[in-house]
Image (cartoon, rainbow, N blue to C red):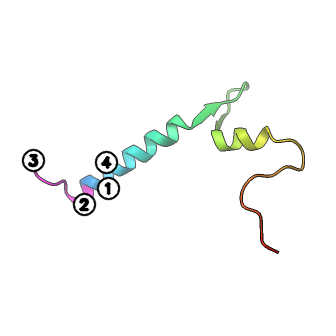
Amino acid sequence: MAEPSPEEAAAAERIKVYAWVRESIRTRGNGTAVHLRELALGSLPEGVTCGPKSAE
């Protein structure tokens, strides 16, 4: 089987990324779509953040 062209390889990679994004998006109760990361951040208690801490 022949190697895919760079354009075909890029298109296949985009399809994989789109599939991943679709799988990581959910709807809220009111019908709006939200990425799972935003749902997780929205469920944190007030004043709590996630992610790397700054080294000050």
Whichever of labels 3 and 2 marks the residue nearer the N terminus, that label is: 3
Three-letter amino acid code of the residue under disc 1: Ala
The residue identified by callout 1 is 10
Q: Are marks 4 and 3 in contact (CB under 8 Å)?
A: no
The residue identified by callout 2 is 6
Q: Are marks 3 and 1 in contact (CB under 8 Å)?
A: no
Three-letter amino acid code of the residue under disc 4: Ala
Residue at image position (72%, 40%) is 40
Residue count near mark 3 (Cα–Cα under 10 Å), binned few <14, some 14–19, many ≥20: few
Q: Quadrant of the C terminus?
A: bottom right
Q: Is 37 a magenta residue? A: no
SS for dot 4: helix
Q: Is residue 22 above or below residue 4?
A: above
Query: Which residue is farthest top?
Result: 29
User: In the image, which residues are magenta?
Assistant: 1-7
Along the viewing direction, whichever of 16 and 49 lies nearer the viewer? 49
Give residue 3's position: percent from left, percent from top.
Answer: 15, 54
Q: Are marks 4 and 1 in contact (CB under 8 Å)?
A: yes
Spatial CA span between label 4 and label 2 = 10 Å
The residue identified by callout 4 is 12
Q: Is residue 37 above or below residue 50?
A: above
Residue count near mark 1 (Cα–Cα under 10 Å), binned few <14, some 14–19, many ≥20: few
The residue identified by callout 3 is 1
Three-letter amino acid code of the residue under disc 2: Pro
Q: Left of 2 or right of it: where is 42? A: right
Q: Are marks 3 and 2 in contact (CB under 8 Å)?
A: no
